[in-house]
Image (tube, rainbow, N blue to C red):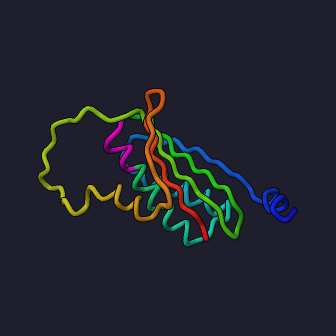
């Protein structure tokens, strides 16, 4: 009976946010995600990690994939704990364009996947119907 009551009290939420392929999109999407997580009353510790994961996955989609891209946040839980899924779906890799690495600090690039791996309880990638989704689950205590 207690398990059924807990299940009834748990709330499932989902929010979808388009990711515009423009400069400044990462910070705009991050602000929107912060507002959504605040509305859902996700614990502050999890929010900090979640916003970093959002930034990394959205940046990856903007830099390495073709538009359009979409961020999907899903929360299953309550104020005492739960699981947050962060998923960014795009239409696959861009055709590599020749570019100069002049002026690019290698210490500032290429660490997104390691950051996501370090913060997520589970993470992965899947291809489906001409799209690629990268996701990460963060579990609140």
The question of residue 57 being in magenta is answered with: no
Q: Quadrant of the N terminus?
A: bottom right
Q: What span is colored magenta in the figure?
A: 59-65
Q: Is residue 2 left or right of residue 74?
A: right
Q: Is residue 80 left or right of residue 2?
A: left
Residue at position x 63%, y 63% in the image: 38
Q: Percent from the top left, x then y, of residue 18?
A: 51, 41
Q: Quadrant of the C terminus?
A: bottom right
Question: Disc count in the image?
Answer: 0
Residue at the right extreme of this rendering:
1
Residue at the top extreme of this rendering:
129
Q: Is residue 23 left or right of residue 1?
A: left
Q: Nearer the viewer, residue 36 or 64?
A: 64
Residue at position x 37%, y 50% in the image: 59
Q: Percent from the top left, x then y, of residue 78?
A: 71, 63
Principal secondary structure, stretch drawn in magenta: helix
Q: Nearer the viewer, residue 99 or 49?
A: 49
Q: Percent from the top left, x then y, of residue 17?
A: 55, 44
Q: Nearer the viewer, residue 137 or 86?
A: 137
Please identify the quarter of the rendering in which residue 37 is found.
bottom right
Residue at position x 50%, y 68% in the image: 48
Residue at position x 52%, y 52% in the image: 86
């Amino acid at each position: 009976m207690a398990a059924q009551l807990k299940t009834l009290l748990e709330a499932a939420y989902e929010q979808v946010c388009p990711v515009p392929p423009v400069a400044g999109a990462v910070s705009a999407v991050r602000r929107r995600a912060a507002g959504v997580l605040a509305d859902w009353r996700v614990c502050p510790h999890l929010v900090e990690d979640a916003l970093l994961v959002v930034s990394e996955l959205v940046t990856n989609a903007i830099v390495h994939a073709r538009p359009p891209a979409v961020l999907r946040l899903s929360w299953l839980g309550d104020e005492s704990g739960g699981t947050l899924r962060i998923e960014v779906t795009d239409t696959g890799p861009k055709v590599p364009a020749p570019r100069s690495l002049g002026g690019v600090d290698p210490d500032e690039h290429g660490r997104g996947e390691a950051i996501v791996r370090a913060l997520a309880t589970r993470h992965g990638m899947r291809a489906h119907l001409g799209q690629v989704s990268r996701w990460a689950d963060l579990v609140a205590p």
